[in-house]
Every structure is written in C-alpha cells, then in structure tokens.
Image (spheres, rainbow, N blue to C red):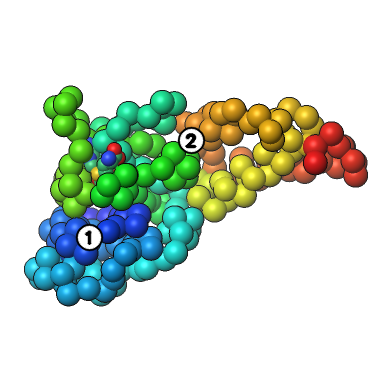
C-alpha cells in the first residue's frame, strides 16, 4: 500500500463543498490520503466536514493551491479525467489500466496525480495538456457524466485493488521528467520553434498540442529531457542574436 502514499488526488475548482467532503471519504476508504484543491470556491467549510463523515483527516491535511501547475509540482505522471471524448485524443485509459500504471510508477518512486474537473464544465483542454494520460470511466453512451466524488471513488477503488495486488516496491529506475520540467521544456521548445520560423505564433494551430501528445506517449526520463533541452539551447546559440522569430 506504500505506493498509494505517492498518489495525490487533485480537484480543480470544486464548487460544492459537499463534493470535497465526499471526495475525502471516497479516498479514505481506499487508502488515499493526499488531496490537493485548486482554487476551491469554499474551503474549509462545514458542509465538507459533514460529508467527510469520519474522513476529516484527509480534509485537514488537504493542500490548497492557486493553480494546477502548483498542484502538479514534482509529479512524474499526471492522469486527467474526463467524461467527454476530446477532439485530439490524449492517450486514453480505462480506470483499471490507469490504476495499474499509476501504482507501478508510484512503487518505483514516481509522484503521481489524478486530476478531476469542475462539476459543471470539467477540465479545459489546456489543463489536460498538463496530463500525460486521459482516464474515462466507461458508462452508457447517452449519460457519461458522474458526480465528481463518485468518479473519485471509482478511480480510488481501482487504485486500492491495484496496490493490493502490486509486487513489493522496485528500486527507482531513471526518474521520469516531472510536470514542472516538462512545462519548462515545452516553453523552450515553443520559443525555439518560433525562433527558427517553424511555428507561426499568429497561426499556431495544434502544433504544441501534438508535441505534448508525442512526449506524453514517450514519457521521457529526466536525462532524456535534459538532452533535448541541450539540443534546443544549441539551436538557439546557432541562430545567434537575431532569428526569424520575435
Ligand atoms: N460536463 C463535464 C462534466 C464534469 S463532471 C465534462 O464533460 O467534463 C466533473 C468531473 O468528474 C469531471 O471533470 C471528471 O473529473 C469526473 N468525471 C465525471 N464523469 C466521468 C467519467 N465518465 N470518466 C472520468 N471522469 C469523470
């Protein structure tokens, strides 16, 4: 179960405190302890505590942050969740497969996040860009949207089962690049692509999303990302002071 201590649940802008409390309870029953709230509308709140019914400790230890980037700091694997199919598919997973992957990564020392969206509007594409995989809970086709705490419960249950059956922790392999390192890399990549005239900032189309998808599939290790950054820096140096970019 040790792997579960490296897995955090992130709720992005939850509106109803009751859902935050129900999430804490869903987590507590399955051995998940780390809740991160991104800009909750009301927290702490009496209703959240009431709905946690015994899982107050999860709420007391919950971390409140202002942005998703802060919530994902240090994470080597972030799994976004959505009821909707997205136009340009992120690598998709069902809960069981996502849980097995997450528990294996966490057992090897990687920090993992499962990211849940707003009650009304879910996660934006820009937020899903921060994730390496997209989890969808299979449902009937004409009603796909679960209550957010119910979605957390399904995922937490699968994590619990996966952790129960997991072999003892392996020594960490090469650490994967973390969310923060990936974000700096994407920023660097974008600057260089603009600079060499490959990416037109006035007409970027979906180039960056495609790049993100490629690297989400590849799941680069930190050393590999450092090599790529080194190449980008060399390209910048090669371009000298003035490039075609702005
Ligand atoms: N209309 C929104 C629904 C949000 S439901 C949308 O289309 O995304 C609130 C949150 O619950 C979602 O952001 C997601 O995190 C989770 N959720 C609800 N149903 C889900 C499903 N079938 N699979 C995965 N996550 C789901």
Image spot of residue 145 (x, y percent): 20, 38
Q: Earlier in the sequence, mark 1 or mark 2?
A: 1
Q: Is mark 2 within 8 Å of ligand 1?
A: no
Q: Secondary structure at mark 1?
A: loop
Give the vertical position of 93 relative to 67 (above or below): above
What residue is shown at x 48% (from left), y 55% (from top)? 69
**Looking at the rendering, which quadrant does residue 166 occupy?**
top left
Bin the neighbour count of mark 1 within 10 Å (Cα to Cα): few under 14, some 14-19, many 20 and up. some
Q: 143 and 102: which one is in front?
A: 143
Mark 1–mark 2 distance (CA, rounded to whole Å):
32 Å
Residue 113 appearing in the image = yes
Residue 174 appearing in the image = no
* Circle nearer the viewer, 1 or 2: 1
Question: Residue 16: which numbered mark, if any?
Answer: 1
Give the vertical position of 19 relative to 202 (above or below): below
Quadrant field for ligand 1: top left
Q: 73 and 41: which one is in front?
A: 41
Q: Which residue is mark 2?
A: 216
Q: Secondary structure at mark 2?
A: helix
């Amino acid at each position: 179960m040790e792997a579960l201590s490296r897995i955090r649940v992130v709720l992005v802008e939850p509106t109803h405190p009751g859902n935050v409390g129900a999430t804490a309870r869903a987590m507590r029953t399955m051995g998940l302890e780390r809740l991160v709230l991104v800009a909750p509308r009301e927290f702490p709140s009496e209703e959240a505590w009431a709905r946690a019914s015994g899982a107050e400790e999860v709420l007391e230890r919950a971390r409140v942050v202002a942005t998703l980037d802060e919530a994902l700091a240090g994470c080597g694997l972030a799994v976004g969740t959505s009821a909707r199919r997205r136009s340009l598919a992120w690598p998709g997973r069902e809960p069981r497969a996502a849980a097995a992957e997450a528990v294996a990564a966490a057992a090897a020392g990687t920090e993992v996040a499962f990211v849940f969206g707003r009650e009304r509007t879910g996660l934006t594409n820009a937020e899903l860009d921060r994730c390496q995989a997209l989890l969808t809970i299979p449902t009937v086709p004409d009603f796909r949207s679960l209550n957010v705490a119910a979605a957390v419960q399904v995922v937490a249950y699968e994590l619990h089962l996966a952790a129960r059956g997991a072999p003892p922790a392996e020594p960490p392999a090469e650490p994967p690049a973390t969310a923060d390192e990936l974000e700096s890399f994407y920023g660097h990549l974008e600057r260089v692509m603009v600079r060499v005239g490959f990416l037109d900032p006035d007409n970027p189309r979906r180039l960056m999303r495609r790049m993100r998808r490629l690297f989400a599939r590849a799941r680069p290790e930190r050393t590999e990302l450092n090599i790529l950054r080194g190449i980008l820096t060399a390209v910048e140096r090669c371009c000298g002071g003035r490039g075609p970019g702005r």
